[in-house]
Amino acid sequence: MSMQNTQLKSPATPKTDGDRVAVLKSTEKRSDQWSQLLISVGETHDRAAFAKLFKHFGPLLKGFAHASRNEGWFPGLGDDLVQEVMIKVWNKASGYNAEKASATTWIYTVARNCRIDMLRRKSNTQHLPLENEDFWHEPDEETPISLLQQKRSEDKVQSSLAQLPKEQDEILRKVYLEGKSHAEASAELGLPLGTVKSRVRLALQKMQVIVSTEAQE
Amino acid sequence: MNNSSQFHPDDTMLLEFSAGTLATAPSICVSAHLHFCSKCRTSLVRLDQVGAQLMSEAKPLELEDDAFESVMANLDSSPQIAAVSEQKRTSYPFSVSKLMKNNLVSQTWKHLTASVDVARFETGQNEFEVALHKICAGGKTPRHDHHGLEYTVVLKGSFSDENAVYREGDFLVREPGDVHQPMGAQNGECICLSALSAPIKLTNPFGFLMKPWLRINPM
């Protein structure tokens, strides 16, 4: 580990950009315990690992379900969501790629899609031609960002989210946790839609979330 | 697919997409844009990190006593779903391909004007009309105004209007009062996905002839 780091920094061994990324990828493994457990579930159908994930994420998922007060909400939503999401986690774990997302982010995306579909099924008796999952099929390819960049942006999000002014934090929570659109948030807070959007933009700037066009290449 | 799209959804729209609070029809358009745009895919990954962080700060709630056992009991009987990464990639965005399959688009193309064909999709919502528009090479469309919002994503080829040329993946929003006259590129047909929230008003004095075709028709 330390040798590889020395080699990485040494100007005596010039590396191409591609080589450098490869070295970083082999030394920088995603080490948080949830991601490790999820990998075990995917690779070996490890039931003990799954039980640990369940114990951690189950109550959070129920909390996430209960934070929503959208059309279609019903008292049993929390328990139903925990069931549906955890079964999906088990079934899809083999497709989890730790280089692209932490387990928490991956499980969040499963939970978000499940929650929307459950609410829509409750409030809409019509057959739904598309499930929410269908909107997220694209980004599976040679990831444009490396694991190191991923972890940097995760750290940045985590630390800057904790420091956001209350008025920005409040709106992000309404949108992500309560499942409100910006228009619904503006009505609830008695603020013009433009104010809600500008607070969202300020928060995104602080967390350095949006990739600017200039920085792309 | 990667290209350098010039026109992207607004940041706040991507955030609503990540949070899952964007309405179905604009979500279809955003997902179509993501198929082409690696920049917005990267932003989306980070927006999902924001959602994940907020979820992990949600107040944990105690589960029912048998919650774990009942999930474990279901695992044995659950079929293994193929991993997303194994899914076949098509040249059209996944959501659009699925709509095309469900709606048998090849059989539903209708002439809108001499140079524009339209195929409407059933999407299970009634706020927007979601449709594909096909403009023939060099085809002119009627100059029109918008009463409501219109989202457009170029899926194939390109078209232009008074302001710019729009290529594959470009994401456009037209607001009420925007008047434009799109024109298909000379070198081939152009196919666009659009979501339209209210009737288009034709500004051509003879436009009334076309009005019934352009009436909003959510399915």
Image (cartoon, coloured by chain):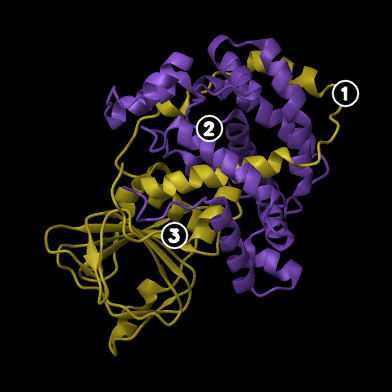
Chain colours: A purple, B yellow
In depth, the one of B11 and A62 nearer the eye is B11
Name the element at disc 3: loop
Select label 2 or label 3 by which is in front: 2
Q: Are marks 1 and 2 in contact (CB under 8 Å)?
A: no
Q: Are marks 2 and 3 in contact (CB under 8 Å)?
A: no
- Callout 2: helix, strand or loop? loop
Q: Which one is in front in this view, the residue at disc 1 or the one at disc 2?
A: 2
Q: Are marks 1 and 2 on the same chain?
A: no
Please give the chain letter of the residue carrying mark 1: B
Instruction: Indicate the amino acid at tag 3.
Output: Pro
Residue B61 in view, yes or no: yes
Labelled pair 3, 1 in contact (Cβ < 8 Å): no
On the image, the x and y values in percent for residue A92 come to: 55, 24
Mark pair 3, 1: CA separation: 45 Å
Disc 3 designates what residue?
Answer: B9
**Subunit that carries the residue with mark 3:** B
Q: Quadrant of residue B61?
A: top right
Please tell me which residue lies in front, B54 or A139.
B54
Q: Which residue type carries mark 1? A: Asp
Q: Give the residue pinned by disc 2.
A: A101
First of labels 3, 1 by sequence position: 3
Q: Position of residue A114 (x, y in %)?
A: 63, 39
Q: Which residue is mark 1?
A: B65
What residue lies at 73% left-to-right and 18% top-to-bottom?
Answer: A52
Graded by Cα atoms within 10 Å as few (under 14), some (14 to 19) or many (20 or more), the crowding at tag 3 reads: some
